[in-house]
């Protein structure tokens, strides 16, 4: 809680990060924590006013419960309590705060309360290097009201602030102890390191309002924090009709916009009542509300207005590279669907168009190759199935093809019949061969017997017959042997029943010679008709290639399907498109650096247009990128004017501290 009493306003704020260490108090060793804390703050409590005791007791309630508290919570309460006691009822009441030594003594007195708490309760530092023991800021105003003005002595350490609000505007009365990174450089904490209370004295004309606040009051409005504070205060005042209603509106606002502690000690001077304060601030209220609304509406423009191009484009360039695969895929989809999009660069369009032409050529080639194979199949199929030629045309080449196919089919059937007959003869031949071989074996045996029984003059003839028989053991030789068996010189040796076998061999040979003669002619005619068919097909083929519709007029649906001449289905074209897409993505990925840079440039040129790839970026950062180029290419007098007005306001807000520092 802040403090308001007598001629004093005080605010303190423990540092959440630096003071995040948790202090676990052994309650069994500190059964009367209330007394220990109060003694640490006051020493002898008997001389303290009941009003101050009540304030301190309310202040330390969180320190007395069973929960473990942060170092920041303990620090802020100890420091504000010691400060208020010292300045209102302690040794520093009425002290000359402009004296640096007096402030140093006051700082030591306040800090002693931190050291005593460490010793009394055994408090230890956190385990992380950035954690401090009992860190807190402090800011207070000791004021003296005069007839027409208020003398405000402002004292602080850290980034808690003091303000004055007047009909002419908000005035900063203190200067944040921070470095360029925003880290607090001067604060209270339980260490031997020296810190100091800084001091400025201001005389402020009445009517006015003095305030001591924690950083939770102004941090939500960075970078225009003074404007944000003034707007919030004036808006709340204009919408309220009492101090209580104003306090409630401010509590409600800060509870909703920020998680940090927002503490404000607020005291008005020179107003007869709340309505008078509200009326005195009305003109300023209207002006600040107007400026704030314009600043809020043009927030993104103001934020990026003075960036370098490298800073303005860094995020989009980096994100385009990181999400390149997704981005390029979306852009390709846009091109293929015929959309116009700012992200479609000429290079991408050329690449997509080139790939589409390549896909089309590839599809045509595959289709053509497939059609040629199918026509070759159809050529073979029609040769044996001329009935599939339907002749839904008077095309002479088609009629010639059908006649050639029918003639070939007729002659091939006759050749097939004769071939079947020849196979039967071959079978008979095999049977006769076996029978003759058996007879030859029997005859050879008989010859051997005859040889022994006959007179010597017959032996020469028998030997000659025996040699001849041995020479006829092959199948052809056996058939010859069968024929020779009929010759007179060995007829004398054949029984009558064996002569029938010889006659059968003779009949078979006669039929075989006749069949061979019959078969030669159909085969020759078949070969001729097949050649005629091929010639007729080749004459028709050119017409079939140039006019595919002719295929469906000339041939049956069964033949077309069987030979694969149907139109390619969606799967055919999808496969071609998929392969083409993969090739295109690889081609564009190989040129990533150039393509990504071109996309960023395209987005910069088309800063007023949305794109299919917007979803790949953070919306706020993409809008900042576009705002940068919008402002760069279209200088806006309203934004320039507002920026100038904000700079003037900033100078007015800090005019008192700037003058005091001089």
Image (cartoon, grey):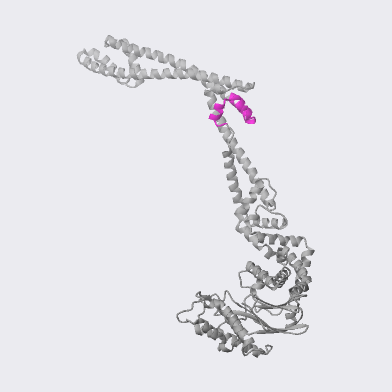
Q: Is residue 27 above or below residue 283?
A: below
Whether residue 193 appears in this view of the structure is no
Q: Nearer the viewer, residue 504 or 309?
A: 309
The chief SS type of the magenta part is helix
- The magenta stretch is 536-565
The residue that appears at 78% across and 62% down in the rendered structure is: 636
Q: Is residue 54 magenta?
A: no
Name which quarter of the figure residue 95 lies in.
bottom right
- In the rendered image, residue 78, in percent from the top left (x then y), is placed at 57, 82
Q: Is residue 282 left or right of residue 438?
A: right
- In the rendered image, residue 413, in percent from the top left (x then y), is placed at 48, 19
Q: Is residue 347 above or below residue 309?
A: above
The residue that appears at 52% across and 23% down in the rendered structure is: 384
The residue that appears at 66% across and 63% down in the rendered structure is: 314
Q: Nearer the viewer, residue 89 or 24?
A: 89
Quarter the N terminus occupies: bottom right
Q: Is residue 543 above or below residue 300?
A: above
The residue that appears at 63% across and 43% down in the rendered structure is: 358
Q: Is residue 195 left or right of residue 268?
A: left
Q: Is residue 551 magenta?
A: yes
Whether residue 100 appears in this view of the structure is yes
Q: Nearer the viewer, residue 630 or 34?
A: 34
- In the rendered image, residue 166, in percent from the top left (x then y), is placed at 75, 76
Quarter the C terminus occupies: bottom right
- In the rendered image, residue 200, in percent from the top left (x then y), is placed at 70, 84
The mark total stands at 0
Name which quarter of the figure residue 507 lies in.
top left
């Amino acid at each position: 809680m802040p403090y308001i009493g007598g001629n004093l306003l005080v605010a303190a704020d423990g540092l959440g990060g630096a003071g995040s260490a948790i202090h676990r108090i052994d309650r069994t060793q500190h059964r009367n924590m209330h007394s220990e804390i109060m003694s640490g703050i006051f020493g002898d409590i008997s001389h303290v006013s009941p009003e101050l005791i009540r304030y301190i007791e309310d202040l330390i309630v969180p320190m007395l419960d069973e929960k473990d508290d942060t170092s920041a919570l303990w620090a802020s309460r100890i420091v504000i309590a010691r400060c208020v006691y010292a300045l209102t009822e302690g040794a520093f009441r009425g002290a000359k705060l402009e004296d640096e030594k007096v402030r140093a003594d006051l700082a030591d007195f306040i800090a002693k309360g931190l050291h005593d708490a460490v010793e009394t309760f055994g408090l230890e530092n956190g385990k992380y290097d950035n954690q401090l023991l009992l860190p807190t800021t402090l800011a207070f105003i000791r004021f003296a009201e005069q007839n027409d003005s208020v003398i405000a002595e402002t004292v602080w350490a850290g980034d808690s602030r003091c303000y004055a609000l007047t009909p002419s505007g908000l005035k900063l009365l203190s200067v944040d102890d921070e470095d360029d990174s925003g880290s607090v450089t001067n604060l209270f904490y339980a260490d031997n390191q020296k810190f100091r209370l800084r001091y400025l004295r201001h005389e402020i004309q009445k009517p006015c309002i003095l305030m001591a606040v924690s950083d939770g009051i102004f941090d939500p409005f960075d970078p225009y924090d003074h404007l944000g504070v003034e707007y919030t205060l004036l808006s709340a005042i204009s919408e309220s009709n009492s101090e209580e209603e104003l306090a409630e509106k401010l509590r409600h606002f800060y509870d909703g916009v920020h998680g940090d502690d927002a503490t404000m000690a607020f005291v008005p001077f020179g107003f007869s009542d709340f309505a008078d304060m509200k009326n005195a601030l009305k003109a300023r209220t209207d002006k600040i509300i107007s400026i704030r609304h314009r600043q809020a509406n043009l927030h993104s423009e103001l934020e990026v207005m003075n960036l370098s191009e490298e800073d303005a484009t860094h995020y989009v360039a980096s994100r385009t590279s990181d999400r390149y695969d997704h981005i390029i895929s979306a852009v390709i989809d846009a091109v293929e669907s015929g959309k116009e999009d700012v992200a479609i660069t000429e290079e991408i369009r050329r690449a997509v168009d080139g790939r589409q032409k390549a896909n089309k050529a590839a599809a045509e080639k595959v289709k053509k190759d497939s059609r040629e194979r199918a026509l070759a199949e159809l050529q073979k199929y029609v040769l044996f199935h001329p009935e599939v030629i339907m002749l839904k045309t008077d095309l002479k080449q088609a009629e010639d093809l059908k006649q050639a196919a029918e003639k070939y089919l007729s002659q091939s059937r006759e050749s097939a019949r004769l071939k079947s007959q020849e196979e039967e003869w071959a079978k008979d031949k095999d049977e006769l061969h076996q029978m003759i071989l058996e007879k030859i074996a029997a005859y050879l045996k008989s010859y051997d017997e005859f040889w022994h029984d006959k007179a010597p003059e017959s032996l020469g003839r028998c030997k000659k017959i025996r040699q001849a028989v041995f020479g006829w053991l092959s199948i052809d030789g056996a058939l010859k042997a069968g024929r020779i068996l009929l010759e007179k010189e060995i007829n004398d040796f054949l029984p009558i029943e064996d002569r029938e076998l010889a006659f059968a061999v003779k009949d078979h040979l006669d039929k075989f010679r006749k069949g061979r003669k019959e078969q030669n002619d159909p085969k020759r005619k078949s070969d001729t008709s097949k050649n005629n068919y091929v010639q007729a097909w080749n004459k028709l083929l050119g017409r079939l290639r140039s006019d595919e519709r002719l295929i469906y007029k000339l041939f049956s649906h069964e033949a077309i399907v069987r030979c694969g001449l149907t139109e390619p289905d969606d799967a055919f074209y999808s496969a071609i498109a998929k392969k083409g897409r993969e090739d295109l993505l690889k081609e564009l990925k190989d040129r990533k650096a150039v393509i990504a840079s071109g996309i960023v440039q395209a987005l910069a040129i088309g800063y007023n247009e949305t794109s299919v790839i917007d979803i790949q970026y953070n919306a706020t950062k993409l809008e900042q990128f576009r705002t940068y180029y919008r402002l760069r290419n279209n200088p806006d007098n309203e934004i320039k004017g507002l920026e100038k007005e904000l700079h003037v306001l900033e100078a007015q807000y800090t005019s008192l501290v700037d003058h005091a520092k001089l």
